[in-house]
Image (spheres, rainbow, N blue to C red):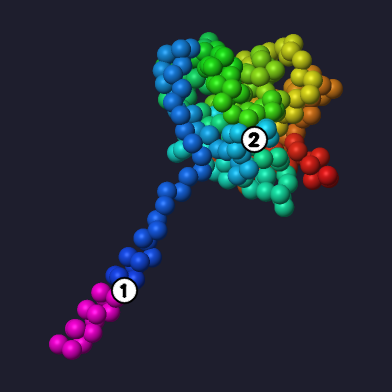
Amino acid sequence: MRSIAILMTILFSALQYGQAQVQNKKVLAIGESFELSSEVLNEDRTINIYLPNSYHADSSQTYPVIYLLDGSLDEDFIHVVGNVQFCSFSWINIIPETIVVGISNIDRKKDFTYPSTMEIDQEEFPTSGGAVDFIQFISKELQPIIETNYNTNGTKTLIGQSLGGLLATQILFEQPELFQNYIIVSPSLWWDDELILKRTLDKSFVGKSIYVAVGKEGPLMERVARTLYNKLSLEKSKEAKLYFQFLENQNHGDALHLAVYDAFEKMFADRKEE
């Protein structure tokens, strides 16, 4: 009986100790979120925002902005924000402190694709073909709201992977002025029988930095990514800074995180020399 009493005393003390350790729990926040009612898309979209530690709304300091496709909390927002925070630490100094705008998805197969002429694409992606509207949503609704409500400096980067990489490529080809920097990872350029790679690049790419990466993702994905880079090199090397990386130890699922870090190192290399 005495041993049972001692055991109960120990357990009671342990419970009290455990309760004392969690009395000061607080919500851990890495940003903020708002709902944007889009007239272009005719739906509400969740926008996730990361603000640097030094950010103050009433300050005159301004920041560059990264726009992240697949920017839901359960997609790429949190790990890309971690990349951004780490790379902008003063003792790392790869990139400047940067605002991140994560665009949450509703139907990425619709938003990230232009209409395909291929029957197989239409069958497998029945809601596809909404890219024009989604690009207008970014340019006419989202960007103005971010620039009006946050302290931005006009420098904008777009990150897109997979179908998001297809959309980023379309924006680069059709409306390159929307962003200064493009990080295109594992782009699904097989879409519409690779027709996008046959387009003429008739827009100015002056002052753009463009990074293309692909992992060990099979002959098709690796070929179209290299074809994109080669096309850019052939047609736009005198206008833009171009970078390519083959991530041989990554696949389609895990290439993005390392690619973003590598893109930051390459595209902002001048900062390391300051």
Q: Residue at x 48, y 12 (%)?
A: 40
Q: Residue at x 71, y 32 (%)?
A: 211
State the mark number for residue 131. Answer: none
Marks 2 and 1: which is nearer the front?
2
Q: Which residues are magenta?
A: 1-14
Give the spatial CA distance, label 2 vs label 1: 48 Å
Q: Main secondary structure of the magenta part?
A: helix
Give the side of residue 24 with respect to residue 169, left or right: left
Q: Amino acid at mark 1?
A: Ala
Q: Residue at x 19, y 83 (%)?
A: 5
Q: Amino acid at mark 2?
A: Ser
Q: Which residue is mark 1?
A: 14
Give the side of residue 59 with respect to residue 145, left or right: right
Residue 19 or residue 56, whichever sits in front: 56
Above or below for 23 versus 267: below
Give the side of residue 30 with respect to residue 185, left or right: left
Quadrant where the image shows the N terminus = bottom left
Residue 221 or residue 54, whichever sits in front: 54
- Residue 59 at what x, y percent from top left? 64, 35
Q: Residue furthest left?
A: 1
Query: Which quarter of the picture shows residue 217?
Result: top right
- Residue 160 at what x, y percent from top left? 59, 29
Q: Which residue is mark 2?
A: 59
